[in-house]
Image (cartoon, rainbow, N blue to C red):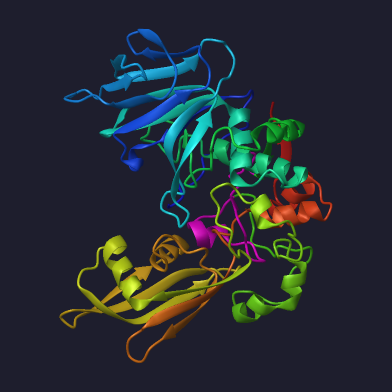
């Protein structure tokens, strides 16, 4: 997940509609199942033929098709095919449509498949040889779903509003740029933003967010700020330059607390991990973010420790990862793992790993960004690259233990910290000013 640079986009003049890829070619699906909630739901082919549908329907790539035709089979055996099938309600108001086996957490340690429901218009077609499902809906409905998908409905209202402004700004700044060659504006997962349709907290979230409809973060340049966010910074926000490879207008590395620390985290990371002052004052620390994680996490998040964590992985597993994810063949043993160059939050941005193969030849992998480091050190994806590393073994590494901080890249809004600020009585504007200190809060529509 290498980030493209955000586009230099001015504020929108009115609410747009957004198209979201909810099943994408990367999911490698040849069929999907859908179920409308109302009895006046219509499927229309690209040549204008319509039919009413109800109950579970199967949509698959048409057998023997050379032109990317998709075919719907309803629960009575009726069929409709075309290069594009569009599903919508005849009632002229938003109706829910269930879609089976939606992938969530692509490539992360919480990857799973869920049945989810969506409002708006659903379009199904073939792309790159696989089924693609796109949901088109008003931008503000999309934002309400993102907020209620990212975090739980028990989060304080001021946090939810702050999260909505960040999510709205991020989506607009990256509109179309993360999926330039795909037939949608954004995808439904962490590569863009979590979008899980009509979630349990969707309706209450939508009411809360009405206080900041159309509000964005404007960077010093005048463009919309690409308002990055993550689950937990671990006590200090990361440097965009060192995490993504470029500066982000309006974002800076800083302590996730009212006052800055008296020392540099990158120079005293081990001290930072155990610092009592950080434990007591960081907004994302458990002492301040006091709500049960089961109440504030998103529906697909894992209930684990986010502020501080320990993780151990064997040499055998790391050798398998080197082969499976990075293409090295015949790896026998790991000789050394040497991380280097921490950013101001303590996150490693570079790492070198030396191996021997079955012929005795030495090989190495060099990682130049936090994403590749996290990809290597976990079968799915490591929580963050802010860690101390303890390698065991003589001559060859037998296992590696990591003692780390935070979950995510660490840039921008710390979601657990934002919850902690709201619990301490801070307003949504206070939260945004803390995490995006050089940005202006503006209403566009």
Q: Is residue 48 above or below residue 38?
A: above
- Report if residue 333 lies within the magenta region: no
Expressed as whole percent of the image width and height from the top left, the position of residue 104 reads 46, 45
Extreme front residue here? Answer: 76
Q: Main secondary structure of the magenta part?
A: loop
Expressed as whole percent of the image width and height from the top left, the position of residue 63 reads 19, 25
Q: Is residue 326 above or below residue 137?
A: below
- Report if residue 241 lies within the magenta region: yes
Residue 218 in view:
no
Q: Is residue 71 above or below residue 40?
A: below
Expressed as whole percent of the image width and height from the top left, the position of residue 377 reads 42, 69
Q: What residue span does the magenta drawing correspond to?
A: 221-248
Residue 26 in view:
yes
Q: Is residue 273 above or below residue 293?
A: below
Expressed as whole percent of the image width and height from the top left, the position of residue 415 reads 65, 53
Residue at point 34%, 26% (across, down) = 58
Which of the 4 quarters of the picture holds residue 99? Answer: top left
């Amino acid at each position: 997940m290498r980030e493209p640079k955000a586009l230099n986009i001015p504020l929108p003049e009115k609410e747009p509609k957004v198209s979201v890829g909810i099943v994408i070619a990367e999911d490698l699906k040849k069929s999907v199942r859908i179920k409308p909630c109302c009895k006046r739901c219509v499927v229309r082919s690209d040549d204008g033929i319509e039919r009413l549908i109800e109950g579970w329907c199967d949509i698959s790539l048409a057998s023997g098709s050379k032109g990317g035709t998709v075919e719907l089979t309803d629960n009575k055996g009726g069929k409709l095919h075309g290069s594009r099938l569009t599903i919508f309600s005849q009632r002229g108001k938003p109706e829910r449509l269930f879609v089976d086996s939606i992938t969530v957490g692509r490539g992360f340690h919480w990857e799973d498949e869920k049945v989810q429901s969506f409002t708006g218009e659903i379009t199904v077609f073939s792309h790159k040889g696989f089924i693609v499902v796109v949901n088109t809906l008003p931008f503000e409905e999309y934002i309400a779903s993102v907020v209620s998908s990212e975090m739980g409905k028990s989060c304080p209202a001021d946090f939810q509003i702050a999260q909505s402004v960040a999510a709205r700004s991020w989506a607009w700044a990256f509109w179309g740029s993360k999926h330039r060659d795909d037939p949608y504006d954004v995808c439904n997962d962490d590569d863009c933003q979590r979008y899980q349709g009509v979630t349990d907290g969707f309706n209450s979230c939508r009411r809360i967010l009405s206080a900041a409809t159309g509000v964005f973060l404007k960077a010093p340049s005048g463009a919309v700020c690409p308002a990055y966010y993550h689950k937990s910074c671990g006590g200090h926000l990361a440097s965009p330059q060192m995490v993504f490879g470029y500066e982000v207008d309006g974002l800076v590395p800083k302590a996730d607390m009212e006052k800055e620390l008296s020392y540099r985290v990158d120079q005293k990371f081990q001290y930072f991990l155990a610092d009592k002052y950080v434990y007591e004052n960081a907004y994302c620390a458990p002492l301040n973010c006091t709500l049960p994680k089961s109440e504030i996490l998103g529906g697909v998040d894992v209930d684990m420790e986010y502020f501080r964590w320990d993780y151990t992985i064997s040499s055998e597993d790391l050798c398998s990862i080197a082969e499976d994810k990075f293409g090295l063949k015949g790896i026998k043993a790991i000789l050394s793992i040497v991380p280097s160059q921490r950013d101001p939050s303590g996150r490693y941005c570079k790492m070198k790993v030396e191996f021997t193969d079955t012929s005795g030849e030495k090989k190495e992998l060099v990682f130049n960004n936090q994403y590749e480091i996290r990809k290597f050190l976990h079968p799915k994806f490591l929580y963050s690259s802010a860690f101390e590393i303890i390698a065991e073994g003589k001559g060859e590494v037998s296992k590696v233990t990591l003692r780390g901080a935070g979950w995510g890249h660490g840039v921008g809004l710390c979601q657990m910290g934002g919850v902690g600020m709201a619990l301490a009585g801070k307003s949504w504007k206070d939260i945004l000013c803390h995490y995006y200190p050089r940005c202006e809060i503006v209403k566009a529509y």
